[in-house]
Amino acid sequence: INFKATVGDVTGFVEFALITTDASLRHAYASWDMGGGSSLLFGHTWSIMAFGFTDMRLNGDLANIGFGTLYFGRVPQLRYTYAGEAFTVQVALEANRVPDESDLEDFEFGDLDPGDYLEETTIPGIYASVSFQPLEMLSLTPSGFFQMVEATAIPGGTKDLDFDAFGLALDGRLDFDIARISFEGWWGQNLGGVANAIDVRPGYATGVFGQPGPKVDAAGNITDVEDANSYGGFVQLTFRFEPAILNLGAGYQQADIEVSPSVATLEDDVATSAYFINVLYNLTDNFYVQPEVAYFDYGDDADKNAFGTGNNDLGSDLFVGVHFQADF
């Protein structure tokens, strides 16, 4: 349920989710139209980073998130937007994506004990995007972000650690008479624990997808962080045959495994992929059904011997289902 109100040049918006026993706040922001195409937004809403999705419905409306779609979710932010005739520019300071607690349990540096750290010191994440149409049939939106994390060791504990996380993405679409090609490609460093739901592999998988690893000295002490690169993307082909829409999509992502010194029983990288096909059929103006088949490949575990000598296959899933939706 949501509420929207406008007074003069200021608009406020609030949205709650009521699908569980407890209401949760999804959006809450205010925007000020400054005139001349400029506006300022403050509140909790969608990140401007890699804002593209597929039309996958199965597995909780996953939209290929964790299988090629880079997702940064809704987050507190201060955002400036300039909408010109030929392009739109957005620049934002977004709340830094690290745990609120004074530890690094969400950043699994190998055997690093989160208790060795007193606090993290961070700057807000810096985000930017530009949307434009170089051709009438082509729309593009490049985006990027940077954030810094500094973990302070307890007195007498492990050395202070710091690392940077950053990423670049390109979202776009090509429009034809009855078809559309949508796509996203991205690359980044230390995205694990920063991007939302980037790791949707089974819970028993070793480590976290795209997360930095430890650099360990001869005495077994962690002296630094090894940065981990990752990349991915998706492509979707859409055909419109009224009253039906056919969607075919695929996504892939890969992350390096970084530890120093290297460990012979660890893979060099891990990867996931997913593929789907669905048909949206409008039964009425406000009700449709959407049967879908989707396949998810979780790839290999980072540990080459996770399930026995030479066995580290995380498996796959094949889902068949129907999505129903009524719009009021």
Image (spheres, rainbow, N blue to C red):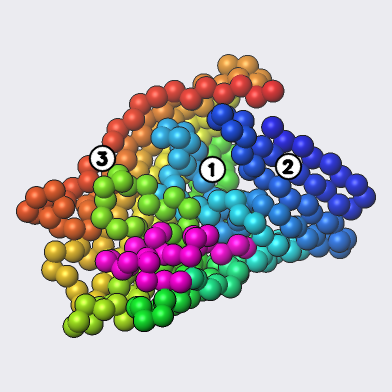
Residue at the spot of label 1: 180
Decide which of tag 2 and tag 3 comes sooner along the chain: 2
Pick the residue in front: 313 or 131.
Answer: 313
Query: Magenta region: which residues?
Result: 94-118
- Percent of width and height locating residue 174: 55, 49
The residue depicted at 26 percent of the width and 72 percent of the height is 259
Q: Amino acid at mark 3?
A: Ser
- Residue 193 found in image quarter: bottom left
> The residue tagged with tag 3: helix, strand or loop?
strand
- Residue 107 found in image quarter: bottom left
Pick the residue in front: 19 or 159.
Answer: 159
Residue at the spot of label 3: 316
Q: Amino acid at mark 2?
A: Val
Kindly report the secondary structure that dominates the magenta region of the rendered protein: loop
Please rate how many residues cluster around mark 3, counting C-alpha atoms within 10 Å: few if below 14, some from 14 to 19, many from 20: some
* Quarter of the figure that contains the N terminus: top right
The residue depicted at 67 percent of the width and 52 percent of the height is 44
Q: Is residue 193 left or right of residue 32?
A: left
Q: Amino acid at mark 1?
A: Arg
Residue at the spot of label 2: 14
In space, the residues marked 2 and 3 are separated at their CA atoms by: 39 Å
Q: Are marks 1 and 2 in contact (CB under 8 Å)?
A: no
> Residue farthest to the front?
155
Foreground disc of the pair 2, 3: 2
The residue depicted at 40 percent of the width and 24 percent of the height is 321
Please count the marks in the image.
3
- Percent of width and height locating residue 135: 63, 57
- Percent of width and height locating residue 278: 44, 30
Please rate how many residues cluster around mark 2, counting C-alpha atoms within 10 Å: few if below 14, some from 14 to 19, many from 20: some
Q: Is residue 296 found inside the magenta-colored segment of the image?
A: no
